[in-house]
Amino acid sequence: MSPDSTTPRPSPAVTIVIDAALVVVFCVLGGLSHSLGEPDAVARIVFSIWPFLAALIVVHAVALATNVDASRVVPGTLVWLVTFGGGMALRALTGQGTAWAFVIVAAVTLAVFLIGWRLINVVVQRRRPR
């Protein structure tokens, strides 16, 4: 049995909310660093959120339909890959930027956020007395 399989996990709804909140945080932080002070900053940030949230919703819908526990680290890695890849694909299809610097920052930041909280959960749960 892998260490991850014995760790108590959040419900699917909580997992989706955490992931969605982290995707929004990623987009807001990025948007604020580039759009702060511009008159359309809020609209640009909202516009940057939807491709990643759409990809996240798709991967979570598939996880729910196939009964995969997306709160675990290994499935969480797939959540990251689909959220990142799908978000970038949707950005490209809708004329949003996909400059290499952004692609790298997005990949790293989303990995830290979407895989990171799952790793933290494993550590916290292991340290809790049973």
Image (spheres, rainbow, N blue to C red):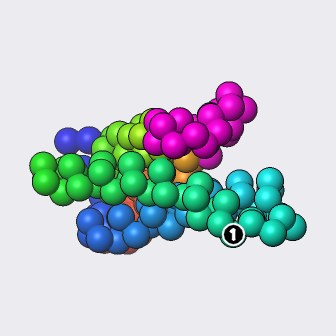
Q: Residue furthest left?
A: 66
Q: Circle 1 is placed at which residue position? A: 42
**What percent of the width, then of the height, locates residue 63?**
22, 51
Q: Residue at x 39, y 49 (%)?
A: 55
Quadrant of the image occupied by residue 12: bottom left
Membership of 106 in magenta stretch:
yes
Segment tinted magenta in the rendering:
89-109
Quadrant containing the C terminus is bottom left
- 108 displayed left or right of 82: right
What secondary structure is the stretch in magenta mostly built from? helix
Quadrant containing the N terminus is top left
Image: 108 above or below 23: above
State the count of labels: 1
Residue closest to the eye, 19 or 31: 31
Whether residue 25 appears in this view of the structure is: no
Q: Residue furthest top?
A: 100
Image: 94 above or below 11: above
**What percent of the width, then of the height, locates residue 80?**
44, 43
Q: Residue at x 81, y 69 (%)?
A: 39
Quadrant of the image occupied by residue 24: bottom right
Membership of 70 in magenta stretch:
no
**What percent of the width, then of the height, locates residue 9?**
30, 64
Quadrant of the image occupied by residue 71: bottom left
Residue closest to the eye, 64 or 76: 64
Q: Residue at x 23, y 55 (%)?
A: 61
Whether residue 31 appears in this view of the structure is: yes
The kind of residue on which mark 1 rests is Val
Category of crowding for the residue at label 1, using alpha-carbon neighbours closer than 10 angstroms: few (below 14), some (14–19), many (at least 20): some
Q: Residue at x 79, y 59 (%)?
A: 35
